[in-house]
Amino acid sequence: MNSGEPAESLTQAQRWRETAGDAWARFHVEIDATFAPFNDALIDAATPKTNERVLDVGCGCGGTSLALAARVAPHGSVIGLDLSPAQLAVARERAAASKLAIEFRQDDAATWRADAPFDLIASRLGFMFFADPVAAFVHLRGQAPGGRAALLCWAEAEANPWMRLGRESAQGLLDLPAEPPAGSPGPFGFDDRDRLFRVLTESGWRSVEIARFDTTIAPAGGAPADVLRLSMKLGPSAPAIAAADEPTRAGVREAMAARIAAWTSGGRVTAPASAWIATARS
């Protein structure tokens, strides 16, 4: 996202600087547990090497940055970029405790320029919000001359039912905003594999390969009560749910609990999940 961005993207940027970023910071332990399979898959695809210099785009609370920094130690380094001050505060605390070489900056990956090139640009669920993705990836390619990229984003919504839990539970109980057009900045901005391939190739990245990664996640660690609590607080529908009166919120909670029960076995919640993992060279 860059300055002069259209209203939809500006809304996304503001959302991550404020309400969404604050919520993700508050629940970072549960979110890390939820996305652990994706984190591992991205690191495997990225193949970070000892002593490399890495940029983590949309680093959030630093889980991916920490994993990357451990792989490039002892003399490598990681810079994590994000728009959310709340998430970056958590990330800095975690990095200080780890004693790894990580620097976090509140900045826009679509325009920020480093003082030295990167060997690797990585992003776990952090690049789907660019207002002009081709321009953003042209810019990022210039940050890694001769380097490579590893990117992970959600596949189609139908393959990620937990991501739809809030909206589908609130349907008919709340006036929700219309679904954004396909390809709009947002969680499912690159759910179309062909669009992801086209954007990367149009922005000059070479040897682009995209693979589907299907897995099972245990949201919030899998305890039903924790899944319900997290689902009420996160996602695009969360602000509308929070603003509703208590009887309406109770109705949403009841609908959510019923859906969560269908994914529960032996007291643990699991749900199917799917992502695209793209690798490329600059």
Image (tube, rainbow, N blue to C red):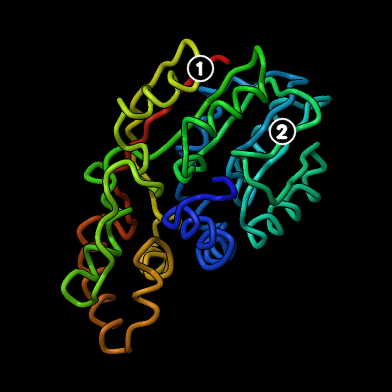
The residue lying toward the viewer, choosing from 131 and 270, is 131
The residue lying toward the viewer, choosing from 34 and 89, is 89
Q: Is residue 230 left or right of residue 149?
A: left
The residue lying toward the viewer, choosing from 206 and 213, is 206
Task: Classify the position of the C terminus by image quarter.
Answer: top right
Cβ–Cβ under 8 Å for marks 2 and 1:
no
What's the amino acid at mark 2?
Ala
Q: Residue furthest left?
A: 172
- Spot occupied by residue 80 in the image (x, y as percentages of width and height): 68, 41
Residue drawn at point x = 55 percent, y = 26 percent: 138
Quarter of the image holding residue 117?
A: top right
**Kind of element beneath mark 1:** loop
Residue drawn at point x = 64 percent, y = 39 percent: 111
The residue lying toward the viewer, choosing from 5 and 23, is 5
Q: Is residue 231 left or right of residue 18?
A: left
Disc 1 packing (10 Å; few <14; some 14–19; many ≥20):
some
- Spot occupied by residue 140 in the image (x, y as percentages of width and height): 60, 28
| Residue bearing the label numbered 1 | 204
What's the amino acid at mark 1?
Gly
Residue drawn at point x = 74 percent, y = 25 percent: 53
- From mark 2 to mark 1, how far is it between C-alphas? 27 Å
Q: Is residue 104 left or right of residue 48?
A: right
Task: Classify the position of the N terminus by image quarter.
Answer: top right
Disc 2 packing (10 Å; few <14; some 14–19; many ≥20):
many
Q: Can you tell which mark lies on residue 243? A: none
- Spot occupied by residue 256 in the image (x, y as percentages of width and height): 26, 68
**Kind of element beneath mark 2:** helix
- Spot occupied by residue 114 in the image (x, y as percentages of width and height): 75, 32
Quarter of the image holding residue 213?
A: top left
| Residue bearing the label numbered 2 | 69
The number of numbered badges drawn on the structure is 2
Vertical position of residue 253 compared to residue 201: above or below: below
